[in-house]
């Protein structure tokens, strides 16, 4: 069904988000990175990981409870590999760390064909797709994964949440071929916890097979959902396990099980990030059929996949590109009345005048 959205000027949104981060003690660079991320999420229609989610996470896990550390510096540890860096994030704001890590990976890829950054003692960087999309738009392949400091996902065949939602995000520079980068981005749970929170806000029920209640029974009620299920059963479980293994080799500790005490105080309870960027020339084989260039070959492959009766199929990244086109068309960020209500909690915290829905032009999408 069509929904009503209100057009919020991007600058107005960004100023509020910056003020919220500054109010919580983050420095100007961190606040700018936080606003840049939240703005991009809203621009591309990522309603599960916009400013509402970002500042909510900071409230329950971050600066409000003393776990995330505003203003700290990243420590870059010794590495014997020129194309790979290892960082101690010291619980710095995740968005600021992620943008710097991706910039570093691109510089390494320019020199070595590939660049990698792993980050221990991280916080939460929210929508991984935003980072890989940004890099893909600059002409590179990009990948990132992360673990969560909280366990929200039950392993396949189990009953207790011991995995994070553990997303994977890939970005491919296909915009020359099809007009937008292909972005494959997902949590390894059936839905993200942010989706549960969104549906709770909007009074909607979850699809079957997404969540369990406090007794471990399947539920479609977002108000009763306490843990999530992996998508694709054993397949999503395996993909979620990949993130945990990356983290384990990097230095990640055990997560906090939702609803329980922290347990051993010596456990770090931190997230871990991994970033990788590759230059397209690093895999260019120069044996493309019919004399095609690399990008012509990409276009031919995608056209074949979407041919043969598959013309109505969407490519990953296409919904985001379509929503970005709407944001551009309407000249601002699109929010529901419920979302504006949530953003007004930030305005109140910052001492700003609350937003009035009537002040924004409404559109039906």
Image (tube, grey):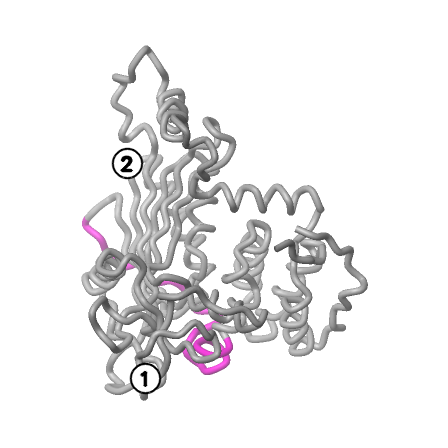
Drawn side of residue 37 relative to residue 338, left or right: left
> Is residue 297 in view?
yes
Can you tell which quarter of the image residue 230 is in? bottom left
Can you say whether 102 is above or below 249 in the image?
above
Residue name at image x 55 percent, y 67 percent: 27
Q: Which residue is mark 2?
A: 112
SS state under label 2: helix
Say few, some or many: other residues with alpha carbon within 10 Å of mark 1 (under 14 / 14 to 19 / 20 or more): few
Disc number for residue 159: none
Q: Distance from label 2 to label 1 (Cα)?
A: 51 Å
Can you say whether 27 is above or below 111 in the image?
below
Query: Residue 1 at x, y = what percent?
Result: 61, 55
Observer-nearest of 146 and 363: 363
Give the magenta part as a residue range. Answer: 59-80
Query: Residue 218 at x, y = what percent?
Result: 35, 74
Q: Which residue is mark 1?
A: 215
Observer-nearest of 323 and 58: 323
Query: Residue 272 at x, y = what percent?
Result: 31, 64
SS state under label 1: loop
Q: Is residue 359 magenta?
A: no
Q: Is residue 65 magenta?
A: yes
């Amino acid at each position: 069904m069509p929904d009503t959205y209100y057009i919020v000027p991007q600058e107005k949104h960004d100023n509020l988000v910056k003020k919220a981060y500054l109010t919580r003690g983050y420095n100007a660079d961190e606040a700018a990175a936080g606003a840049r991320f939240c703005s991009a999420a809203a621009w591309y229609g990522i309603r599960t990981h916009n400013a509402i989610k970002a500042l909510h996470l900071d409230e329950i896990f971050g600066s409000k409870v003393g776990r995330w550390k505003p203003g700290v510096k990243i420590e870059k540890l010794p590495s014997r590999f020129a194309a790979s860096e290892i960082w101690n994030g010291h619980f710095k704001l995740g968005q600021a760390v992620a943008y710097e890590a991706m910039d570093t990976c691109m510089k390494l890829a320019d020199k070595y064909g590939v660049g990698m950054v792993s980050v221990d003692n991280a916080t939460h960087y929210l929508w991984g797709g935003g980072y890989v999309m940004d890099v893909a738009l600059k002409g590179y392949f990009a990948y990132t994964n992360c673990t969560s400091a909280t366990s929200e996902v039950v392993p396949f065949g189990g009953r207790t949440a011991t995995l994070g939602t553990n997303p994977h995000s890939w970005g491919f520079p296909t915009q020359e071929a099809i007009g937008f980068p292909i972005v494959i981005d997902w949590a390894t749970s059936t839905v993200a916890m942010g989706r549960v929170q969104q549906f709770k806000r909007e009074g909607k029920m979850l699809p079957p097979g997404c969540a369990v209640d406090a007794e471990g029974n399947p539920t479609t009620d977002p108000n009763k959902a306490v843990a999530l299920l992996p998508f694709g059963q054993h397949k999503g479980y395996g993909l979620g396990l990949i993130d945990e293994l990356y983290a384990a080799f990097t230095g990640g500790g055990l997560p906090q099980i939702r609803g329980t005490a922290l347990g051993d105080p010596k456990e770090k309870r931190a997230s871990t990030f991994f970033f990788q960027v590759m230059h397209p020339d690093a895999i260019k084989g120069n044996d493309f059929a019919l004399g095609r260039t690399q990008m012509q070959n990409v276009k031919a492959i995608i056209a074949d996949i979407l041919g043969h009766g598959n013309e109505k199929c969407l490519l990953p990244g296409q919904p985001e590109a379509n929503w970005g086109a709407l944001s551009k068309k309407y000249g601002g960020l699109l929010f529901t009345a419920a979302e504006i209500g949530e953003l007004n909690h930030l305005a109140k915290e910052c001492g700003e005048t609350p937003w009035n829905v009537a002040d924004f032009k409404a559109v039906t999408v």
